[in-house]
Image (cartoon, rainbow, N blue to C red):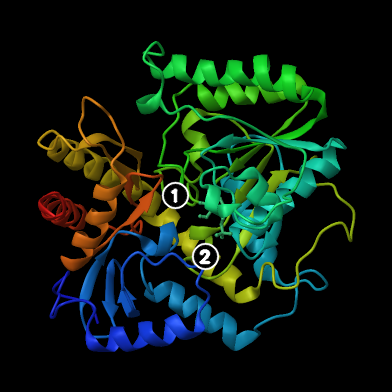
Amino acid sequence: MPYSNVPDIKMPLPGPKAKAVIEADDKYISSSYTRGYPMVIVRGLGLAAEDVDGNVFLDMTAGIAVNATGHSHPRVVRAIQDAAANFQHMSGTDFYYPLQSTLAKMLAERTPGKSDKKVFFCNSGTEAIEACIKLARWKTGRPWVLSFRGAFHGRTYGSMALSASKAVHRTRFAPIMPAVVHGNYPYPYRAAPHLDTPEKVADDCLKYLTDTVFRREVNADEVAAIFVEAIQGEGGYVVPPDNWLPGLRELCTKHGILLVVDEIQTGMGRTGKFFAHDHWGIEADIIACAKGIASGMPLGAVIAKADVMQWPPGTHASTFGGNPIACAAAVETIKLLDEGLVENAGKVGGHLIGKLKEWAGTCDRVGEVRGRGLMVAVEFVKSRDSKEPDPALRNAVEQTAFKRGMLILGCGANNIRFCPSLTITEAEADKAVEIFAASVVDAVKG
Ligand code: PLP
C-alpha cells in the first residue's frame, strides 16, 4: 500500500515499541555500530520508511546509498521471490547458473571503455576491495597499493589499510596490512588559498604523488594499483575537479600501475551515469561495486579488463558470492536503472542541489553545497568566513530532521549527505529541502 502522507510522525520519538526493540538491541547487538538516532524500521515503500510504532519517515539515506530502486520495489521483490522458489544457493564457485553470466554480461556492457571485461562476484563492498587488492598484486607482481586520505574502502584488513577517513576505524587493530601509501584527494573547498581553482588543487595532489610519494616513499614501479573513489564518499561527498581522474589515469598508464575505481557508493546510476567515473571519460582497469547493485540484497562485484582478470582457477573465490537471489535482484535493478532511474538520478539530483544551494544562500552556517546526481552534501561551518568545521551543528541537524520525520546521515566530520533512492521525485526532493531547512533552524536554536 503506498503511503499517502510522508512524513507522518504520530508521537514523540522514539515510540514505545521502538524503545523496547532498542533495549533488546542494546543487550544483544555489538556495541560497534553507530546508530545516530532511534529509527526502528518494520517496512517501507519507495522513499517512505515506517517504524515499529507506525510513524512514517521520508528516507533520504536509502540504507546508506543502497536501495537504488527504493524500499521493496514490487518488481525487485518479485524477482527475489521467483529466484528463491527456483533454488536458493548452489555456489557459483563450483557450479554454473544462468543468472551469474546474465548479470556479468549486463555489468560488463555498462562499464565505460572499449576493452572486454570480466566479473568476479562477492557479497559486500569490502570483499570487492579485497578481491581488487589480490587481483592487482597477482596481475602486476608488485606489492604496494596506494589510496587517498579521506578515503573509505571498507573494514577488513586490506580495505581498512587503504581507508584513511577516521582513526577509530583502525584504533587497536594494528598491525594492519603493510605496503600501503596514501596521497591527497583534491578537496577544493578546503584547499590552501593559493590553489585558487579546482584544477590547481587536483594538479597539486597529482604533483604530491610524483614528487613526494614516488620519490620519498615507494618507487612507482613497485606500485600495483591506485585505489580511488570517483567521488569521495564517507570523506564528505567530495566531488573532484575535472582534471583529477584523467590525471590519475595518465599517471597509472605511464608507470604500469592499475587504476582501481571504487564505485561502491558512486556506482549503479547514483550520480546520473551508470558508473561515476564515466563523467570524466576515463576507463578504469578494475572497478569495485556493491551497495546499490542489488537493491539491498548482499552482493559485490569486481569488474576488470579481461586481460587483467586472468587469474587461474583456485586463486580467488567465494562460497556465497553471486548468490542466485542477489543476482536476480541485481538483474531487475539494472533493468529499472535502464528504464529511467539513472536519468532520474541526474535530473532530480540536479534539482535537489539547486534547491539546497538556493536555501544555503540564506544560511551563514553552510560552507558549501556540492554533489553529483543523488550524492549530495551540505557542509556545516561555524561561519562562512572562518570555514571552521561545525560537527556539533551537523550532529544536531541529524536529530532535528529525525524528529521532523526525515532520515539523513552524516559524512566526513561536518557534512550531511543526501543519498536517497533513485526513484525520488522532484516533489519528494522539495519536501526534503523544506524539512531540512526547518531542521537547521531547530538545530541552530538548540
Ligand atoms: N567503499 C566505499 C566507497 C564505501 O562507501 C563503502 C561503504 O560505505 C565500502 C567501500 C565498504 O562497503 P561494505 O560496507 O559493503 O563492506
For the point 12% across and 53% down, the residue is 434
Q: Give residue 50's position: percent from left, percent from top.
A: 27, 78
For the residue marked with disc 2, what is the amino acid? Ala
Of callouts 1 and 2, the N-terminal one: 1
**Label drawn at residue 93:** none
- In contact (CB < 8 Å): disc 1 and disc 2: no
Looking at the rendered structure, the secondary structure element under dot 2 is helix
In the displayed structure, would residue 107 be above or below residue 306? below
**Label drawn at residue 269:** 1
Q: Is residue 281 visible?
A: yes
Q: Which residue is mark 2?
A: 294
**Which quadrant holds the C terminus?**
bottom left
For the point 49% across and 29% down, the residue is 280
Q: Quadrant of ligand 1?
A: bottom right
Looking at the rendered structure, the secondary structure element under dot 1 is loop
> Which corner quadrant of the image does residue 262 belong to?
top right
